[in-house]
Image (tube, rainbow, N blue to C red):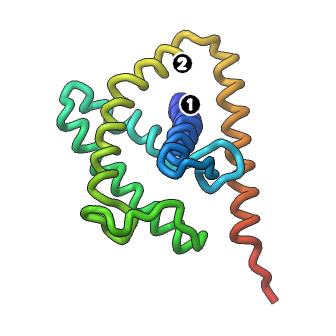
Amino acid sequence: MNKIIYFFVAGTLGGFVIETLFKILTNKENVSSGLLNGPFCILYGIGTAFMSVMLTKYKDNIWLLFINSALWLSLFEFITGIVLEKVYKTKLWDYTGMFLSIGGKVCFTFTLIWGVLGVVYIKVILPVLMFIYNNANPLFINAIISTIFIIIVIDTIYTNVKIIGFKKYD
């Protein structure tokens, strides 16, 4: 379980960096990336943990890895888009008008991007993360992971209370 939380934490931080750089490069401005207040993108954290556990079996077949990454991550993005609209009344992305867009939540271009990112993650980034995890002092790495994970949980609770609020019952 510690390893899954490690992948999740790495993904939330890495996703924040990816999203921030993407927004700076495409919008020429620094826009907040993600729903939370801190530098965390939960979508990427869950996706990273999922890929680390479920997609490593395809690491020796780049095409199956690409296809599974593209499909699973696009499905996850689509479901997340629905949840964001229904629960949080917000859109963090909108692919309306892009080639093969489905409800503005997924599109062909980003399906390809998720496929490529999945391959890069499994073939390049995951081995580096595993090297760090396996060679770092266990007490140190567990302290860092636990601290960041607790901060993410607190940020998630705070954000949900702030956005959704408490329903008053009469």
Q: In this picture, is 129 found above or below 157?
A: above
Q: In this picture, is 136 found above or below 32?
A: above
Residue 95, image quadrant: bottom left
**Label tally:** 2
Q: Do the residues labelled 2 and 1 touch (CB within 8 Å)?
A: yes
Q: In this view, does 154 lie to the left or right of 50?
A: right
Secondary structure of the residue carrying tag 1 is helix
Label 2 environment density (alpha carbons within 10 Å; few <14, some 14–19, many ≥20):
some
Check disc 1 and report the residue beneath it. 6
- Disc 2 marks a residue whose amino acid type is Tyr
Q: In this view, does 91 lie to the left or right of 167?
A: left
Residue at screen point 36% across, 37% down: 117
The quarter of the rendered structure image containing the N terminus is top right
Residue at screen point 52% across, 71% down: 85
Q: Which residue is the extreme one toward the bottom? A: 170
The answer to whether residue 44 shows anywhere in this view is no
Residue 94 in the image: state x and y as whole percent: 44, 64
Q: Nearer the viewer, residue 170 or 133?
A: 133
Check disc 2 and report the residue beneath it. 133
Secondary structure of the residue carrying tag 2 is helix
Residue at screen point 79% across, 82% down: 168
Residue 83 in the image: state x and y as whole percent: 50, 67
Residue at screen point 55% across, 32% down: 10
